[in-house]
Image: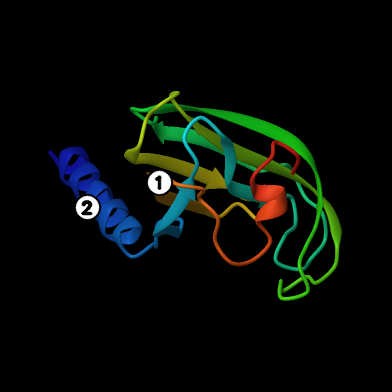
Amino acid sequence: MYAAKSNAILAAGLFLGLAGVPAMAQDTATRTETAAPGKSVRILIASNLKDDCKPGAMPEIRISTSPKNGSLITKTGSVTTPSSHKCPNKKTAATGVFYQSKDGFTGTDEVVVEVKKADGKTTTQTINITVGGSATKGGDDTKKGSTDL
């Protein structure tokens, strides 16, 4: 009987001890992108830079929800971070995710992507894609509109 009480107390202690340990942080974000019908557009890019701007392992990308009206490809290459990045103008390895709608499709599509970064943090991004028109926005869309990173 003593052993049973000890095991119950030990189990309760472990449970309470673990309850105070925070789970690995997982950030979530929802954002929108635009795409021209039947054209490939980059919807996500993840580099291998850690928080200290040093290179680490390549990001792990997992598609949680695939698009219903298009397809995705991933491509690995290198990019130079923009001057507004916390690690400005740094050439680094990266993986890009590209979306292409079915020919003739216009409307909305959705993708959910999980990215485990070089620093071990995981982010889940819900990307709502509006397909139609010329799909141009402000900023540097010259790279986004091709399969080059």
Of 30 and 25, which appears nearest the observer? 30
Quadrant position of the C terminus in the picture: top right
Element marked by disc 1? strand
Image quarter of residue 121:
bottom right
Q: Is 70 displayed left or right of 10 in the figure? A: right
What residue is pinned by disc 1? 129
What residue is pinned by disc 2? 12
Of 77 and 148, which appears nearest the observer? 148
Spatial CA span between label 1 and label 2 = 47 Å
| Other-residue count near label 2 (Cα within 10 Å), few / some / many at <14 / 14–19 / ≥20 | few
Q: Residue at x 45, y 47 (%)?
A: 133
Of 107 and 17, which appears nearest the observer? 107
Q: Residue at x 82, y 54 (%)?
A: 55
Given contact means CB atoms under 8 Å apart, are the residues at marks 1 and 2 in contact? no
Residue 108 placement (x, y as % from top left):
32, 42
Element marked by disc 2? helix
| Other-residue count near label 1 (Cα within 10 Å), few / some / many at <14 / 14–19 / ≥20 | many
Q: What is the three-letter code of the residue carrying label 2?
A: Ala
